[in-house]
Amino acid sequence: MGILSWIIFGAIAGWLASLIVKTNDEQGALGNIVVGILGAVVGGFLAGVLFKSPGVTGFNFSSFVVAIAGAVILLIVKRAITSKKSV
């Protein structure tokens, strides 16, 4: 995939993940792109380790599922790290 494909892929995956985790109001378009691309990397790595799957293989449905799952994991971890804890 070319750089433009990664940007579009990341934007869609990041946006859908932010809707799932309900962080869409907190991040803009650039945040969705970054979360989507990093989610594709994380999801691809986890898919390879857990399922011996190639992970993200292009602009297709299975790659979207992997990228969205990775982005959701990223957003949940980010929320856990940055949440304010009352003592």
Image (cartoon, rainbow, N blue to C red):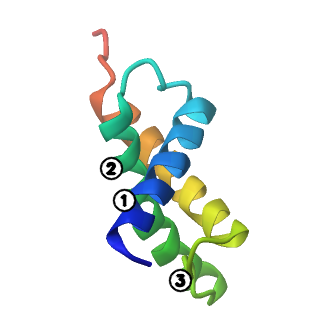
Quick check: 17 above or below 85?
below
| Residue 19 in picture, x, y percent from top left | 59, 31
Residues 23 and 85: in front is 23
CB atoms of marks 1 and 2 within 8 Å: yes
| Residue 69 in picture, x, y percent from top left | 59, 56
Q: Going by the image, does 83 lie left or right of 68? A: left
Q: In whole angstroms, how far apart are the C-alphas of marks 3 and 1? A: 17 Å
Closest to the camera, between mark 3 and mark 2, is 2
At horizontal 47% and vertical 39% (from top left) the residue drawn is 76
Seen as rendered, the residue at the extreme right is 61
Badge 3: residue crowd in 10 Å (few <14, some 14–19, many ≥20): few
- Residue wearing tag 2: 34
| Residue 71 in picture, x, y percent from top left | 48, 51
- Residue wearing tag 3: 49
Quick check: 84 above or below 31?
above
* Quadrant for the C terminus in the image: top left
Precedes in sequence: disc 3 or disc 2: 2
In the rendered structure, which amino acid carries the disc numbered 3? Val
- Residue wearing tag 1: 38
Q: Going by the image, does 5 lie left or right of 64? A: left
Q: Going by the image, does 70 lie left or right of 3? A: right
* Quadrant for the N terminus in the image: bottom left
Quick check: 83 above or below 35?
above
Q: Which mark is residue 61?
A: none
